Image: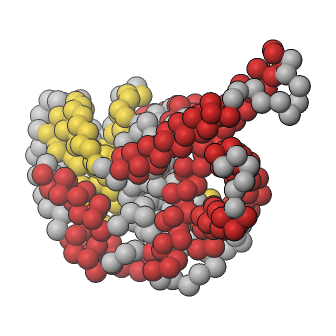
Amino acid sequence: MIALFILPVYVLANFYVCRWFMKWLDAICHGHLNKVVRVLIHIVYWTLSLAMYIAALIPEGTVRRIFNVAGTYWYGVVIYILLIFVIFDAVRLIMRKAQKTPKGEMLISRNKFIALGAFCCIFILLIAILGGINARTLHNTEYEIDIDKDGGKLDNLNIVMVADQHMGYSVRSSMMRDMVERINSYNPDIVIMAGDIFDNNYDALDDPEELLKIYKSINSKYGVYAVYGNHDVSEMIIGGFTFPHKEKLVADERMDKFLEDAGIKNLRDEYVVIDDSFYLYGRPDYQKEGRGIEGRKGPSEVTAGMNQDMPIILIDHQPRELQELANAGVDLDLSGHTHDGQIFPLNLTAKLMWENPCGLIKKDNMYSLVTSGVGFYGPGIRVGTRAEVVNLKVNFTGSKK
C-alpha cells in the first residue's frame, strides 16, 4: 500500500528538485538554455526518476535490471538532494524576511548562485559514489559474551551471523562471494542467517547457479541455519515499498529449494539440539510468517518443554519482544532487519523505533545481538552505517555437572 502512496509524493519531490536544477542551468546560460537541450534534460531526468516504476512494467531481463538498479539508486540520492534544497529554501526565505527583499529580487548574485549550485552537485555526487561503495563494502564485526550455563560438550561456541543479504537486482554474486570468504575466515562452529536472504523476487538473482555454488562453499562444523524475513516472499516491491495484497505471501518455492540445495536448514517455528549442548530455535517472521504457519508461537511457547539448564539460542529476523523472550528463558537472540537505518538520518530514527537497532545489548539474562546486515533494500547506498559479517564468541561459564 505504501508504494501507491509514495508515488505522488515522490513525483512532487522530483518536480521540486528538477525545478531548482533548471534554474541553476538557466543561470549558467544567462537564461538562454537551448530548448532542445532543455527537453533532453527533462527526458533524461524523468526517465531516471521514474526508472524503478518503469522497471515494474518491463519483462524480466537485462533492461529491467538496469532500470531497477538505476531507479533505486537515484531514489536514495534524491533524498539528499531534496534535503539540501529544502534547507537552502528555508534559509532563503529567512533571509528574504530579515532583509525585507522584494519577491522576485535575487538574494545573492548570479555567480554566487552558480557556485552554490556547483558545490551542491559535487556534494551530492560524492554521496552517490561513496554511499554506493560503502553499501557494497563488507566489514567484520566481533563480539564476545559469557552465558552462565553449562554448554554440555562445549566450553565455547564460535558463531558467525549474517542477515539481510537481499540478493536480487542490486546485490549480486560478487558481494555474496566476499561474504562467504569472510564467514569461512572465522572457521565457524555454526553459521546463522537471520532473514531477508532474498529480495522478494527470485528471478532478480543475477546467477542462481553461481550463487548456489558460493553458498555451498560455506564451511561450518555444525552447519548453516536460517530463518526467513519479511522480504523472503514472492511480492511486487518498488524502492523498498509494497503494494496491497489479499492473499497470504509466501516464499517462491525456488527460494526453498535454493536453501535446501545449499545445505542450509531453514527453521520454521522449530528448534534443533546441537551436539546435545544447546538449543537453536528459528522463528517465522513477525509480519510475514510464510507457508504453512498460521500464527507463530509466542515467547513462552518457544521455550515450553525445553530444559532451561541448557543454553537457548534463538533466531528472530526482527528484534521484537526482547523482554518477553528474556522472561521465557532465552539466552541469546540473534536478529537483523533494521539495517541500522541504512542511510542518515534514518540511522538516528532507528534508535527511536527499536530497543536494539544494532549491536549487542543485555536484557536481564538475555543478550540481544542485531546486525546491520550484509546487503541493502530500496536505495543502493549506505550513509552513516556499514554492511557487516558478525563473529560472536560465546563462552559457557556455568559449572559442569
Please report the residue visible at 66 percent of the width from the left and 64 percent of the height from the top: 37
Q: Quadrant of the C terminus?
A: top left
Measured from the top left, where is residue 319 in percent x and y? 47, 43
Q: Quadrant of the N terminus?
A: bottom right
Please report the residue visible at 35 percent of the width from the left and 50 percent of the height from the top: 133
Measured from the top left, where is residue 311 in percent x and y? 27, 41
> In this orientation, which residue lies closer to the viewer: 238 or 352?
238
Q: Is residue 2 in sight in this rendering?
A: no
Q: Please give left or right for residue 128 compared with residue 207 in the image.
A: right
Please report the residue visible at 23 percent of the width from the left and 58 percent of the height from the top: 178
Q: Please give left or right for residue 118 compared with residue 89 in the image.
A: left
Q: Please give left or right for residue 134 compared with residue 284 in the image.
A: left
Q: Is residue 175 in sight in this rendering?
A: yes
> In this orientation, which residue lies closer to the viewer: 201 or 318?
201
The correct choice, above or below, for 140 with respect to 348 in the image is: below
Measured from the top left, where is residue 260 in percent x and y? 31, 75
The correct choice, above or below, for 131 with respect to 292 in the image is: above
Measured from the top left, where is residue 34 in percent x and y? 69, 61
